[in-house]
Amino acid sequence: MTTPDGRREPRLRPTPRSGLAARPEHEAWMRMALAVAAEAAASSDVPVGALVVDAEGAVRGIGHNVREAVHDPTGHAEVVALRAAAADLGRWRLDGTVLVVTLEPCVMCTGAAVAARVDGIVFGAWDDKTGACGSVWDLARDRASLHRPEVTAGVLADECAQVLADFFAQHRGEG
């Protein structure tokens, strides 16, 4: 199914489950993630930013895409932020935390969040090509998953999508 502007409509529009729905801090966290995303763009990486936030609201891990900068195919913002949070907390199990990211996580990043046992994933823009939290796949809530974090989608979605659109327009010579 496509939208009126010709974009493919995500297959699923997940309904947030209790716990992560409409928390006021989501927008503040997403604005922080957008600022982190700008750092990726400055280094010619796709501008995606991520944070891992603990139950008290403290940022425990920050990451932006570094695939180009360090030549690492796993250098997605979410993986960088999850690694930083694990190092900060001194444990790989990140229960009690929320992953906040400007773009819907891909399969690898959703899998990493599930493996890390984050309590929730909050994302901005939908990714109708590789999204794994409701667009193309719904790994985060797959009944067969070892762990199922709560998902809140579309926080500051237009702003997050615009950052990506501007980046790609500039890199394609359109901007």
Image (cartoon, grey):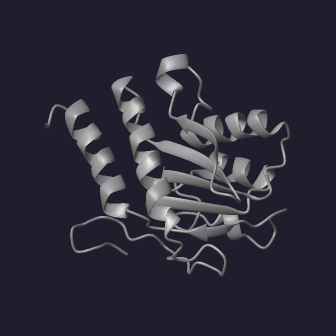
Residue 27, image quadrant: bottom left
Q: Where does residue 119 sit, x and y in percent of width and height?
A: 73, 63
Q: Where is residue 82 in the image (x, y as percent from the top left)?
A: 68, 41
What residue do we see at 28% from left, 39% from top? 168
Looking at the image, can residue 2 be seen? yes
Residue 129 in view (yes/no): no
Q: What is the x, y in percent for residue 83?
A: 71, 35
44 with respect to 105 (left or right): left
Q: Nearer the viewer, residue 107 or 151?
A: 151
- Taking the view exactly as shown, the residue that stands out farthest to the top is 70
Q: How many marks?
A: 0
Could you tell me residue 35's position as x and y percent? 40, 41
The quadrant the N terminus occupies is bottom left
**Quarter placement of the C terminus:** top left
| Residue at 36% across, 53% down | 160
Q: Report the front residue among 130 and 117.
A: 117
For image coordinates 25% across by 66% down, the residue present is: 6
**Residue lying furthest left:** 175
Query: What is the quadrant of residue 98 in the picture?
Result: bottom right
- Vertical relation: 137 (above or below) 70: below
Q: Is 83 situated above or below 140?
A: above
Residue 120 vertical placement versus 91 (above, below):
below
Q: Which residue is drawn at 47% across and 22% down?
A: 68
Q: Quadrant of residue 63?
A: top right
